[in-house]
Image: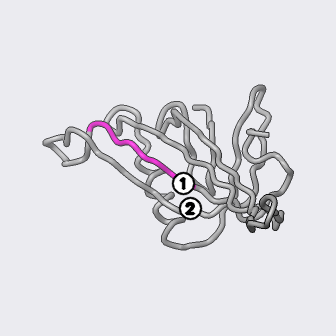
């Protein structure tokens, strides 16, 4: 199995909890004040940098529930963890320390034998706590 993204101890893999979409959002704080002729802006620093990952698994065929349990543990511990994104030829880009800001788990079509959804979709929102290399998860 090939790990595509690692969030602390949770591995998002091709077979298992498979990430299907990654999106990044970064913002700068630029408050403005109206003057007689225009608006004056002041650059006061960088705001939140977040990554949102959407992943899906078919737990009865591919597994992946262990990664969801690990993510829930990281969220409840409320501590930063390492974020690593794999590239080609087994090269990884270290995104830095992240906190799990939000975790949404959706189950569809519950299996009658164990009550677990046949399709489990997860949306993970990470916030960058400390950047370790300038490249935030391979986006830059």
Q: Is residue 101 positioned above or below 118 on the image? A: below
Q: Determine the residue located farthest toward the right in the rendered image.
A: 133
Q: Is residue 106 part of the magenta span, yes or no?
A: no
Residue 21 position in % (x across, y down): 54, 35
Residue 26 circle label: none
Question: Residue placed farthest to the top in the image?
Answer: 89
Residue appearing at x 76%, y 48% in the figure: 136
Q: Name the main secondary structure of what is drawn in magenta.
A: strand
Give the camera-side residue of 24 and 120: 24
Decide if residue 67 is on the left or right side of residue 4: left
Q: Residue 121 versus residue 113: which sits nearer the camera?
A: 121
Residue 110 at what x, y percent from top left?
19, 42
Q: Are marks 1 and 2 in contact (CB under 8 Å)?
A: yes
Q: Which residue is mark 2?
A: 100
Q: Residue at x 62, y 49 (%)?
A: 51
Residue 69 sits in quarter: bottom left
* Element under disc 1: strand
Q: Residues within 10 Å of mark 2 (few under 14, many from 20)?
A: many
Q: Is residue 121 left or right of residue 109?
A: right
Observer-nearest of 90 and 107: 107
| Residue at image mark 1 | 125
């Amino acid at each position: 199995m090939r790990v595509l993204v690692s969030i602390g101890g949770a591995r998002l893999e091709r077979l298992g909890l498979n990430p299907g979409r990654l999106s990044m959002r970064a913002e700068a704080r630029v408050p403005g004040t109206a003057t007689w002729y225009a608006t004056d802006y002041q650059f006061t620093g960088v705001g939140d940098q977040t990554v949102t990952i959407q992943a899906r698994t078919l737990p009865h065929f591919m597994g992946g529930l262990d990664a969801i349990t690990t993510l829930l543990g990281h969220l409840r511990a409320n501590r930063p963890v390492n974020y690593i994104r794999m590239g080609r030829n087994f090269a990884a880009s270290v995104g830095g320390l992240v906190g799990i800001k939000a975790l949404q788990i959706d189950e569809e079509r519950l299996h009658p034998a164990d009550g677990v959804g046949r399709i489990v979709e997860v949306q993970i929102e990470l916030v960058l706590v400390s950047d370790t290399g300038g490249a935030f998860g391979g986006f830059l």
